[in-house]
Amino acid sequence: MEIVGADGSKLALKSGSKTTFGRGSGFNTDDRTVSRRHVELELETLVDENGETRTEEPSVSFEVTGLNPVWVRRGTNGEIKVFNSSDKGRLENGDWICVSGRVPVWFVLKKTEENGKEERDLGSESGAESVDIEDIDPVK
């Protein structure tokens, strides 16, 4: 899962670890109402008590750790809810979150497409390792 901002910024969320989201951590803003550690996000592990992967959509739990509120807009019905400092909540795939009332930038929670993809060694596929660059003049 990842948080993708309307400004193009992205923040990947890793299962089982907390991710700090705020000014300079996840996106850049000069808005001083956004704390550096404004929200703690945690991607919940989709494993049942038997160690089997569950089939439902993953979700992200969060806690507002900054002084100012955050706004969450549900992807299903567009309902907006305000979460104040120390409040806890949950984000589902397609939900939106905003951490600034002064300079609002909305971020959507999306599934990444990394799951199931294998890593490839791009160098061996491109043939770049066999190029002789000794005779190339970088000035020309």
Image (cartoon, helix red, strand yellow):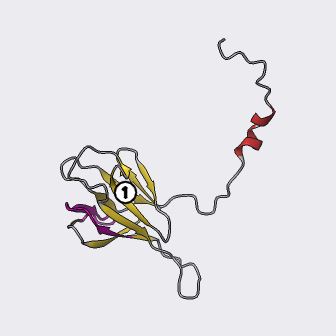
Percent position of residue 12, x then y: 47, 57
Q: Residue at x 67, y 17 (%)?
A: 138
- Is residue 68 inside the magenta stretch? yes
Q: Is residue 102 above or below residue 110?
A: above
* Magenta-colored span: 61-80
Percent position of residue 112, x then y: 51, 58
Farthest residue to the bottom: give it: 50
- Is residue 67 inside the magenta stretch? yes
Does the image show residue 75?
no
Instruction: Look at label 1 and name its amino acid.
Output: Val
Percent position of residue 116, x then y: 63, 63
Q: Residue at x 35, y 63 (%)?
A: 95
Does the image show residue 34?
yes
| Left or right placement of residue 68 versus residue 95 in this view | left
Q: Secondary structure at mark 1?
A: strand
| Left or right placement of residue 33 versus residue 4 in this view | left
The residue beneath circle 1 is 108
Q: Is residue 61 above or below residue 136?
A: below
Report the front residue among 117 and 123.
123
